[in-house]
Amino acid sequence: MEDFDKQLEVLFKTTNTSKISELSKALSVSPSTIRTWRGRNKIPDSAFRKADNSAQNVSKKKTSSQINLPFYAISASAGKGTLVEVEEQANLISFEPEWLNKEIGVNPNDVFLMLVDGDSMYPTLKNGAMIMVNKHFNGLCDGIYVMRYEQNLLVKRLQMLPKGIIKVKSDNNIYEPWEINKENLDGTDIEIIGRVVWSGQRM
């Protein structure tokens, strides 16, 4: 029975099962069929093909459960500001929709990824950090945002002040804060692109 047991172990491993009842479901055969194989001391080649197909289907399901977020080959400057000449989507990065929804609290269709350039948001955001930006947010409140100022794309902390004044701050205190008025957020010279909801960076 040694040959059969070795073959059975291969099937268990391929289908990620540990019991005959689980294996029979994975291969779409009855437990009695597997017992017949044991009596013959031989597992047919078709069973191994089914096991391979089952493993591939499980892998596809796991992959399809993820969602691809757009990652743009541009940087939001955390410094004096950099001229944005192109905004081309570079590639896609996969995330679990459940994690995005429950942990980050965003709709996957509303977010994209980009990089931080500069040190004005240090230590919160380091140079080269990847940030997730939520394009659809309900009203401005204190937080970190990506904004377009004239032809510069910036990532800054915004603080809401009375009379419609917004203080634009850097977490690195060597940079001086400045102010804008909500009335100027018309998308011409100043535009809020989205709120930063997550970051990934080297420690």
Image (tube, grey):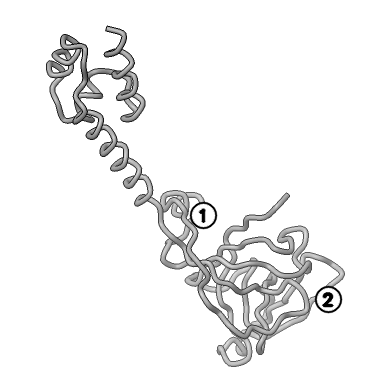
Q: Quadrant of residue 53?
A: top left
In this view, the residue in front, 80 or 177, is: 80
Q: Which mark is residue 14?
A: none
Secondary structure of the residue carrying tag 2 is: loop
Relative horizontal placement of residue 77, taking residue 59 as reference (left or right)? right
Q: Earlier in the sequence, mark 2 or mark 1?
A: 1
Q: Is 202 situated above or below 85?
A: above
Residue 45 in the image: state x and y as whole percent: 21, 28
Q: Which mark is residue 176?
A: 2
In this view, the residue in front, 27 or 21, is: 27
Q: Quadrant of residue 1?
A: top left
In this view, the residue in front, 1 or 80, is: 1
Residue 57 in the image: state x and y as whole percent: 28, 43
Residue 199 in the image: state x and y as whole percent: 62, 58
* Residue in the image at 65% along x and 79% along y: 153
Residue hosting label 1 = 104
Label 1 packing within 10 angstroms: few (<14), some (14-19), many (20+): some
* Residue in the image at 32% along x and 46% along y: 61
Secondary structure of the residue carrying tag 1 is: helix
Q: Amino acid at mark 1?
A: Ile
* Residue in the image at 77% along x and 65% along y: 171
Q: Residue at the far right: name it.
A: 174
Q: Quadrant of residue 12?
A: top left
* Alpha carbons under labels 2 and 1: distance apart: 30 Å
Q: Residue at the far top: name it.
A: 1
Relative horizontal placement of residue 198, taking residue 3 as reference (left or right)? right
Label 2 packing within 10 angstroms: few (<14), some (14-19), many (20+): few
Q: Is 160 situated above or below 172?
A: below
Q: How many marks?
A: 2
Relative horizontal placement of residue 44, taking residue 181 as reference (left or right)? left
